[in-house]
Amino acid sequence: MIERQSIAAPPLELTGIHTHYGLSHVLQGIDLKVGAGEVVGLFGRNGVGKTTLIKTVAGWVAPSRGEVRFQGESIVGLSSDLICRRGIGLVPEDRRIFPGLSVEENLRLGFMQVANHSRAQARRKLDETYARFPRLAERSSQMGTTLSGGEQQMLAIARVLVGDPRLLLIDEPTEGLAPMIVDEIFALMRQLRADGIAVLLVEQNLQRALTVADRFYAIERGQIVCEGRGDSAADRQILMNHIAV
């Protein structure tokens, strides 16, 4: 019975999450779920707790209270590397491309998420990644930090994907990028959903994000203030009313 419950559990479930930075009470009782194969948007103005929530799930920040469950099991208290190895990949807002490393060397760091992978498996996964990101294949020997902003974003996403995550956390992937690159990133989101990878997406471009989001949550002052479906005009209007500037 326990195993069946674990299989049926959503990839991600947050219950009553509180997170502090010192005396600052950033998250104040967050309840949130991401189902299997869902793209879930997390929206709100700057400074309301979106990135803190992402970092809490990834283990970069410890919650002061509440439960984070991944595939039915608590991950509170686990280190960020152990959470990563369980199948949660984080693409941070600042991308964190490693200086002094080529595109391929940056990609190979993604295999740290995978236990006991062989050289042949790594090569096959790199080939698959280059097929998905042909621009990275063209620049495989180029230093990662010399890529354009859009190419660096693609590299940051690809580096996580080589580890075959079951849940992807993506923080502001299109900020400051050219429209053509934004189109490519949202096309990738649709492909990830088709591949059955669950995604929690923080994104300021609401109109574009709602075209790929199955569901969404809006956050204000560390609390969820509304949730709805991306394909519901009524739900979208409620969202806009909450976070319109």
Image (tube, helix red, strand yellow):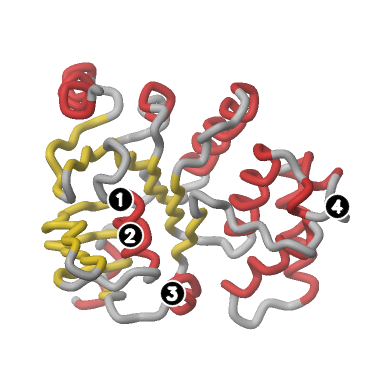
Real-space Cα separation, disc 3 to disc 2, in angstroms: 17 Å
Q: Residue at x 51, y 54 (%)?
A: 91
Q: What residue is shown with label 2?
A: 11
Relative to 157, residue 18 above or below: below
What whole-number distance in Å separates the C-alpha atoms at marks 3 and 1? 22 Å
- Mark 3 touching mark 1, by CB under 8 A? no
Residue 40: percent from left, percent from top: 33, 42
Amino acid under disc 3:
Ser
Please identify the quarter of the rendering in which residue 126 is found. Answer: bottom right
Q: Amino acid at mark 4?
A: Gln
Residue 99: percent from the left, percent from the top? 73, 62
Q: Amino acid at mark 1?
A: Gly
Give SS at disc 2.
Answer: loop
Q: Which mark is residue 80?
A: 3
Left or right, 236 with reference to 127: left
Q: Which residue is mark 4?
A: 142
Farthest residue in the front direction? 23
